[in-house]
Amino acid sequence: MLLITMSFLMKVIAFVILFLMFVITTESAPESALITKLPGFIGIFPSKHYSGYVTIDKEHGKNLWYYFVESEMNPMKDPVVLWLNGGPGCSSMDGFVYEHGPFNFEPGKTNFSLPLLHLNPYSWSKVSNIIYLDSPVGVGFSYSKNESDYITGDMKTAVDSHAFLLKWFQMFPEFQSNPFYISGESYAGVYVPTLASEVVKGNKEGLKPALNLKGYLVGNGVADSMYDGNALVPFAHGMGLISDQLFENVTEVCNGNFYANDTPDCEEQLAKVSMDIDRLNIYNILEPCYHGTLLSAFDIKSLPSSLLQLGKTEKPLAESEIGRWALSTGKLSFHHDAGSMISFHQNLTLSGYRALIYRVQETQFLSTNRGRLWISIADF
């Protein structure tokens, strides 16, 4: 099922590309980026949709891509929420298609038929204006004409995303006074607090426009290597994935320290834990896990002619720049240079910013246990 799902996502992205590629412009007025229809959806969108590129470095040709959905309730008063998928290297179209975007996507009956789009009753756009951003540069549709920009890291990503926000709110000035929240999942557990800190810093320095940041949301997020690493074994035991005996053995031998413990006896016991959980779906231990290649790159050039005919133009979307689209790119050379997120969370919450940290119990990779450990240290 997961294999079908990944293939389906690529098909969804394919037809979205075709209808977006003629409206994507850099630093254009919002109306020129307005999206009024997508193939597979019959009717009128319940709110306005926009999509485009924002150039954050003209000299390098550095461009970040976004898809913006206005709130269906009261767009002029409802919060503006930035959404970031993790990775690092995953496109936020993942969140748009599979999580809280405005549509539910029903697969077509054949490999060459388009998905049908239905309104998602649980879309975040029911109560908020939401920006889906492909970040950092090199992810999804975001690109640079200078390949050196694909060498990046936590802090550079925060700086670039902040530059995007400053320009985006200049393009959409009517939203500058709305409450603003930054959200994301998985590795966005790093993206979100580092970007929020960059926004706070920019506001203090008087950068314009001032961003009306009120808080942030992190789902199943990474936070601290040591606390995250030490949470896996207790989680596996608590969920019945390893035996009581193995848990007792590994806890005793490793002295409760499972992260970066290179003592031979501890490594031996941890290897047994890894063996027991190796064949499980790390994102949902209750779901089947399909092994092997889950996602192959999507080549814009290989679009079937039947799909190409749906667009108003056959000019590929930034083909020379993005080349092959992938849900999760491998083109980045990414440096994890921000360290622990605990101090970021402490500084933000002590400064009065609201934080929502939420997790799914069945997610082995980013379990609830991990959150409990560092949250207790951060003293929220």
Image: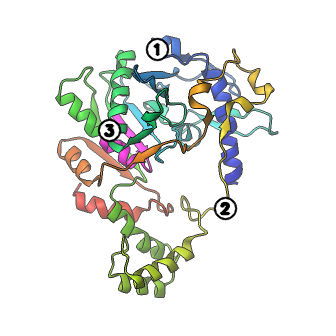
Whichever of labels 2 and 1 marks the residue nearer the N terminus, that label is: 1
Assign a secondary structure to mark 3. Answer: helix
Q: Quadrant of residue 351?
A: top left
Residue 349 is situated, as x and y percent measured from the top left of the image, at: 22, 46
Q: CA distance from mark 2 to mark 1?
A: 43 Å
Assign a secondary structure to mark 2. Answer: loop
Q: CA distance from mark 2 to mark 3?
A: 35 Å
Q: What kind of residue is marked 3?
A: Leu
| Residue drawn at x 56%, y 23% as measured from the top left | 46
Note whether 241 is above or below 212 in the view shown.
below
| Residue drawn at x 59%, y 22% as measured from the top left | 45
Q: CA distance from mark 1 to mark 3?
A: 24 Å
Q: What kind of residue is marked 2?
A: His
Viewer-nearest of discs 2 and 1: 2
In the picture of the structure, the residue carrying the numbered disc 2 is 291
Q: Quadrant of residue 149?
A: top left
In the picture of the structure, the residue carrying the numbered disc 1 is 30
The N terminus sits in image quarter? bottom right
Q: What kind of residue is marked 1?
A: Pro
In the picture of the structure, the residue carrying the numbered disc 3 is 195
| Residue drawn at x 61%, y 32% as measured from the top left | 323
| Residue drawn at x 29%, y 58% as measured from the top left | 375
Whichever of labels 2 and 3 marks the residue nearer the N terminus, that label is: 3
Q: Residues within 10 Å of mark 2 (few under 14, many from 20)?
A: few
Residue 222 is situated, as x and y percent measured from the top left of the image, at: 39, 54
Note whether 148 is above or below 31 in the view shown.
below
Viewer-nearest of discs 1 and 3: 3
Whichever of labels 1 and 3 marks the residue nearer the N terminus, that label is: 1
Q: Quadrant of residue 192?
A: top left
Q: Using residue 76 as the reference point, say whether residue 199 is left or right of it.
A: left
The C terminus sits in image quarter? bottom left
The answer to if 124 sits in the magenta stretch is no
